[in-house]
Image (cartoon, helix red, strand yellow):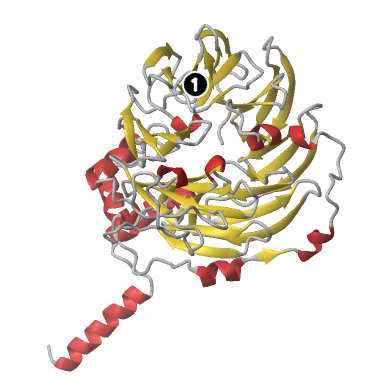
Amino acid sequence: MNKLAVIIFICFSINIVQAGSLPEPIQKTKENFKTHCASCHGENRLGLMGPALLPENLKRLKQKAAHKVITEGRAATQMPSFKDQLDTGEIKSLVDYIYTPLKEIPKWNMGDILSSQIVYPEVKKLPAKPVWNADPMNIFLVVELGDHHVTVLDGDTFNPVHRFASRFALHGGPKYSPDGRYVYFGSRDGWVTKYDLYNLTVVAEIRAGINMRNVAVSSDGKHVIAGNYLPHTLVILSAEDLSPVKVIAVRNETGDSSRVSAVYDAAPRKTFIAALKDIKEVWEISYEDEPPMGFGKWMHDYREDSGENAGLSRSKDKFPIRKIKTEDYLDDFFFNQSYELIIGSSRDKQAKVLDLDLGRTIKTLDLKGMPHMSSGITWQYKGSTVLATPNLKEGVVTIIDMQSWKTIKRIKTLGPGFFMRSHENSDYAWVDVFFGPNKEAVHIIDKSTLEIVKTLRPAKGKTAAHVEFDKQGKHALLSIWDIDGEVIVYDARSFKEIKRLPMKKPSGKYNVYNKISRSSGTSH
């Protein structure tokens, strides 16, 4: 073959590929991904309801383990088994595909964030009082995942006040401003929305990332922080109009980057706390106008009365970071009420107690399976504060004394649970059986005897989950997680059904008072 013939052959081959004719195995794998994976993870693998499927985001999951996840599904997640739809070779091809780097990972920097901002200036003129007639502190927001809407619900009459469309796949729970007037939503595809509850209108929106986990609001009401899976960043926004203030790349000292599992507001500390997915660290970020002296510098105890910060000046940098090293990855957090301690766990690993002031682990807990720490609650039991947590892998609720850190009791349930809730004015704690054949069941536990006293089955064959109490603790609202679902209102003392409200797969319900008062019976 002469030179001219070779050149013609190469050009002809390139044109075929450019025309979209891919080798058959690759084309088949992409079709399988589009059919079975794209609705949750995005056709471009950048994440939607599920996380981005890129090598950069799969560092903790080996390819052999990924093959098992696709084949068998993953416990305590929405990831199903595909062994009946795909053969072993097809699953292997999918694993190879998701571990293949993209030619270019889309960037989402300060300029991109700023250009996405949408502000509605006319809302500044709206009155600072509700346009509806109800107790502003006893309002619920109900997130309806079925058609991406939010219902504003009167917590006294249990009548809907308003219903509005949300961004796609809200996640992490809405977060209220300190006075309860505004609420901030985070969506899986990176959008943050500020909504005026008093006037039932959107104030501002901005896209803080490509694949986001959740948002938190500072206790002074000045800032919002977003934690991203993609890119590996924390984004701090002005709470007034969501203008971006700072983008923080999540990297350790050696340059390794990490996804952000979740962000929290530690109100008594005036800091944000970030849980990291791929680095064995917990980050604490001060949002005070004048951060404590030495904050972000290495020391045993940064508090001003500790004596260690003598001679140090206050940080001139806004949002300084304390990078606290941990013994293991801590994906899932529970805080004690003073926010001095983190009780954290990771998938299939032991739970640890981390002292934020000391910056180190002080205890390893006797918690088996996969405790869902972020759904933990506390109450007083025989003169001590106890922590109760459901388990994502086992049918058990574990009760731990928070003074001795010993397990008091393991309460057997009908299956693994996801959410647990109570209220200071209630004698009972409610826990669902989210996974398995008994998903329709909800247990009610007497907090004084640590015994199950009632099991409800409100909708045969449908998942019953996520209880939230009203402001006074008199009523408990339960979701039926189905496209033709309901929110069911119960008398929290007699457990009698009061009312059913049809909704489209209602997931979480969030009471204004319980959230802004940081009730010990709910998550924060």
Quadrant hosting residue 67:
top left
Residue lying furthest left: 1
Instruction: Report the residue marked by disc 1.
Output: 433
In the image, what residue occupies the spot 73% across and 28% down? 501
Left or right placement of residue 149 versus residue 301 in this view: right
Judging depth in this view, the residue of 176 and 66 nearest the camera is 176
Per the image, label 1 sits on a secondary structure element best described as: loop
Judging depth in this view, the residue of 372 and 171 nearest the camera is 372
**How far from the left and from the top, in percent, is residue 493?**
68, 11
Quadrant hosting residue 457:
top right
Left or right placement of residue 490 versus residue 89 in this view: right
The image quadrant where one finds the C terminus is top right
Three-letter residue code for mark 1 = Val
In the image, what residue occupies the spot 32% across and 29% down? 363
The image quadrant where one finds the N terminus is bottom left
**How far from the left and from the top, in percent, is residue 185?**
62, 48
Judging depth in this view, the residue of 439 and 93 nearest the camera is 439
Left or right placement of residue 10 versus residue 139 in this view: left
In the image, what residue occupies the spot 41% across and 40% down? 356
Q: Is residue 301 visible?
A: yes
Judging depth in this view, the residue of 27 and 62 nearest the camera is 62
**How far from the left and from the top, in percent, is residue 58?**
32, 51
**How far from the left and from the top, in percent, is residue 508?**
61, 34
What number of labels is visible?
Answer: 1
Say if 265 sits above or below 390 in the image: below
Q: Is residue 83 visible?
A: no
Circle 1 Cα neighbour tier, 10 Å, few/some/many (<14 / 14–19 / ≥20): many
Say if 395 sits above or below 51 in the image: above
